Structures are given as structure tokens and as C-alpha cells.
Amino acid sequence: MDLLFLTPIDATYISQLNPNQNFGPTAELLIGRSAIPGDVFRSLLKFDISPIPAGSIITNATLRLFLIDKDNPAIQLLNINRNLSDFLDETVTFNTAPAFAPTE
């Protein structure tokens, strides 16, 4: 079994309260509800999967993220979704973000 470590080639976050603002590229990603009522942050990551040989069967994948700060004391359920189209971390906003589908 071969192991492959991939690093995001694009990474940013978007804000529902700032729907036309771009925050990328950035290594510090915001997710979930902020302490400001009505604001939700979503983070977008893109990986280059071309190193994975065609026909490969992926049996396990792990995404490692580290929590640095939490400004909203409420417990929050976080979901990981699959982007249904491409984005550019330099231009994407909440209003232009790709549609997404839940992961299985």
C-alpha cells in the first residue's frame, strides 16, 4: 500500500456576513458560526490529485486540521462537503462559491 501526502494548492475561507469579500489565499481557515450573529464561515480547499495513478482504488483518506482558536462558545457540528465546481482562492466569495454536496 502506497502512502501519498497532498497539500492544498488553493485554500481560503468565505463569510456569509461579507458575501462579496475575498479572504484568500490563506493558511488560517475559519469555519462554523462566529460570535457575530448571522455570520457563518466556510473554508475551501483544493488539492492536486494528479499524483494518484489512474485506476487507483483509495481505501482510506485522512484530512488533518488543527484548531487554534474558537470565538463562539457554542458546540457546533461541522460538515465536510465536496465542491461541485472549481474556485480560485484569490477571487471566490460567499456569493460566488461553488455549489457543494455532502461527502459519504
Image (cartoon, rainbow, N blue to C red):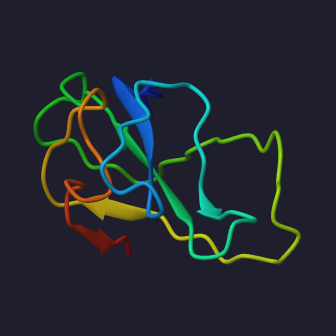
Q: Which of the 4 image quarters holds residue 48? A: top left
* Apparent side of residue 80 relative to residue 19 in the rendered image (left or right): right
Name the residue: 56% across, 67% down. 39
Please tell me which residue lies in front, 91 or 9.
Answer: 91
Query: As displayed, is residue 12 above or below residue 58?
Result: above
In percent of width and height, residue 8 lies at 41, 28
Name the residue: 35% across, 57% down. 19
Q: Which of the 4 image quarters holds residue 51? A: top left
In percent of width and height, residue 101 lies at 27, 73
Please tell me which residue lies in front, 5 or 14.
Answer: 14
Q: Residue furthest right?
A: 73
Name the residue: 38% across, 75% down. 104
Please tell me which residue lies in front, 1 or 73.
Answer: 73
* Apparent side of residue 66 relative to residue 38 in the rendered image (left or right): right
Q: How many marks?
A: 0
* Apparent side of residue 3 relative to residue 39 in the rendered image (left or right): left
Q: Which of the 4 image quarters holds residue 1? A: top left
Name the residue: 48% across, 62% down. 17
In percent of width and height, residue 66 lies at 74, 40
Query: As displayed, is residue 83 above or below residue 10?
Result: below
In percent of width and height, residue 61 lies at 48, 48
Please tell me which residue lies in front, 64 or 21.
Answer: 21
